[in-house]
Image (cartoon, rainbow, N blue to C red):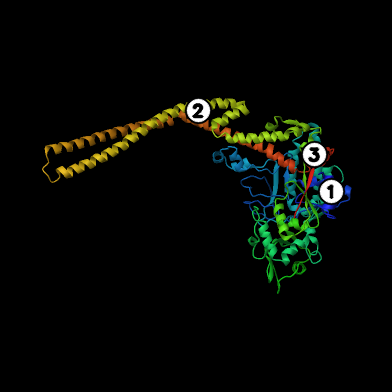
Amino acid sequence: MTLREAVAQLGTVAPGAPLLALGQTVFWDEPMKAGLALEAANAGVEFVAGVHDTDYFAKAPGTKHAKNQFLTLPHNDGSTKALWSAAAEFSCLFGSETVITKDALIKAGLRFDRLNQIRKGFLDEATQAWGWRGIVSLDEQPPITLEVKADALSRELCKTLKWSIDESTSSFGGEGFDRAVKKGDELNAHFCDSADRDGQTLSQVYRDLLPKIYSFVANRPVQMETTQTSQLLRFNRSTCTLPRFDLLRKFIEDSSAREAYDQAIKGFPGLYSLAKFGTGAIPFDLVIPGVGRGTIRVGNRGIVINTPRPQFLSFKNPIQSLEEFAKLIESKFGTECVLVGKAVTLIGMLGREFVFSFHEGASSYVKASRELHRALDFRVNPILRIRYQLWDSLENLQGWFKLPEPLHRAFGSDDVCFPSFAARWRAVGLEQKERLARLGTLRKPIDLVQYLEQLVGGAWSTQAKEYIVLQRQLSVLSREVEDLSEKRTRIYGRLREIRGLWQELERQKGDHFRERIFDRLASETDMETRARYSQRIFLLQSERDSLKGALHKLGRKQREAAQDPAVMRAHERRREIEIEAELKRLKLIREAIVSSTGLENANRRPAAWWLPMISPDGKLFDAVMKSAECWWEPMN
């Protein structure tokens, strides 16, 4: 169904419920929901855009701790593998947070370990997501977004926003470049206008930006209400009876809800049973002004809040109701605390009163949330899912892309008009996935070199011819070395035979001596027999010595053949070509993933501000919203 049809059905699906668009940043895909906001305004439906400011700000593992400082990082499968930056992430046009994993490189045939040995920091460089940057906190205990002062972050935020804008404008030429620069300046001006006030938090800046960015993306004013989770989920005696805290009531008033939670999250990666958080833990956190955020643990005689510095409440009898719980919280910490559900329970809190609008693929914990609601027989409004077709929507627009380097080979050109990009991007993605599969079959260096000759030509034709000549030269040497090796092997075999024969003759000679000569008057025949034993042993000894000499000479010849300067240079040159071929394979892999999976991810959840940069007249926005597909995802 279309956006308009979805809004029209809202009164039946969730009567009286406002639409809620909740995101941690305004610079990614959330403002794409401007189309939904416009349809809601036309239908007289309430639309609320909010800043999710009660989650933790990203922290990068392994960075030096520096209080109130921030750093922009790329995402890769090495030093920033565990990075998760949602409150301050940026993608340039065509970019996405598509990490090119080590497993993907190896699957595509890359001789990873070999390259990793010769290049310092190779894993980070090889696996870095193209066109994406995220800002992280350097605090040992990262703050929640609500507590981040805009002044502390503004420098890094400005720098990273400028990077994403500049990288994007470089994807246009001629008049398109000038128009893109103008729109980039307009976006930056909106940010500066909202951020240029002393004493603000990041969430206040984002909240002020929401209507500006929505209107910027839609190329027309967009009516909406704005909020933030620190306001929506403020918890005290006057708010605790709101439906948004009904799910919390289940956990406060019925301990069996904890068992239902643990059962619901089984099998979901990254989710932990409540015991992981301590005795009495419930899947909710309390944000205490000036103290921080921590998991709530409820006992029979007290409550522990696992903030960085734990907070405690004590009481004589077990808590019987949510109202009693709210009274305790307010009495100890005041009226400004925020009670926020963890990943699985947040949807159940706000979904009680609102209808979440999620883009396709957003929120990986929805299935676990649904399992919990079913287990508790807890009614929650369905989610409105939205799928966009950004690249397809370019088909009827005029303009040109000056494609970034990773897309050149895939599209066969540096410059591509909008309709051609729309017509080709899916086919390009399929071709690049086939290329990845083909690369994965090229396990022998000669196969890879010949593939590069066919695909790239030019210098690789020369490289392939040289590699074949080197292969032939080294093959002749290899046969010579193998011949010498075979001769040595035969000598070693004969030496083993000699050793066996020698030992047997020595045994027979000893037996003969004890039986026929020792302590006896030996006959002439016996003495002749003994002499024959000695003669045969002597001949074996002579043959052994001769063979050892031959073995030594063969070994010297083998070493000389292998260590010949010309031969060693041939080996080195062959290794150089093989390394060059692997580096070229790496580039092809990265291009293929950026041109396939990367473009698919960018199409699914684009940074909304790309649209006016591509099409300042709003035609792309209109086309994207017209083709948007919606569906209801039940949460019970």
Three-letter amino acid code at the position of disc 2: Gln
Question: Residue 429 or 375: which is nearer the viewer?
Answer: 375
Q: Which numbered marker is on residue 613?
A: 3
Tell me which numbered mark, 3 or 2, is placed earlier along the sequence.
2
Specify the quadrant of the image occupied by residue 418.
Answer: top right
Labelled pair 1, 3 in contact (Cβ < 8 Å): no
Horizontally, residue 171 falls left or right of residue 619, namely left
Please give left or right for residue 485 compared with residue 317 in the image: left
User: Can you tell which of label 2 and label 1 is closer to the viewer?
Assistant: 1
Reply above or below: 130 against 347: above
**First along the sequence among labels 2 and 1:** 1
Residues packed near mark 2 inside 10 Å, few (<14), some (14 to 19) or many (20 plus): some
**Whole-number angstrom distance, CA of label 2 to CA of label 1:** 68 Å
Question: What is the CA distance from the residue labelled 1 to the residue labelled 3?
Answer: 28 Å
Dot 1 or dot 3: first in sequence order is: 1
Residue on which the image places disc 2: 471
Name the kind of residue labelled 3 in the image. Met
Local secondary structure at mark 1: helix
Q: CA distance from mark 3 to mark 2?
A: 53 Å
Mark 1 = which residue? 7
Label 1 is placed on what type of residue? Val
Return the residue found at the far bottom. Answer: 316
Total marks in image: 3
Under circle 3, the secondary element is helix
Tell me which corner region of the image, top left, top right, bottom left or bottom right, holds residue 271: bottom right
Determine whether label 2 and label 1 are within 8 Å by CB.
Answer: no
The residue shown at (38%, 31%) is 486
Residue 514 in picture, x, y percent from top left = 17, 45
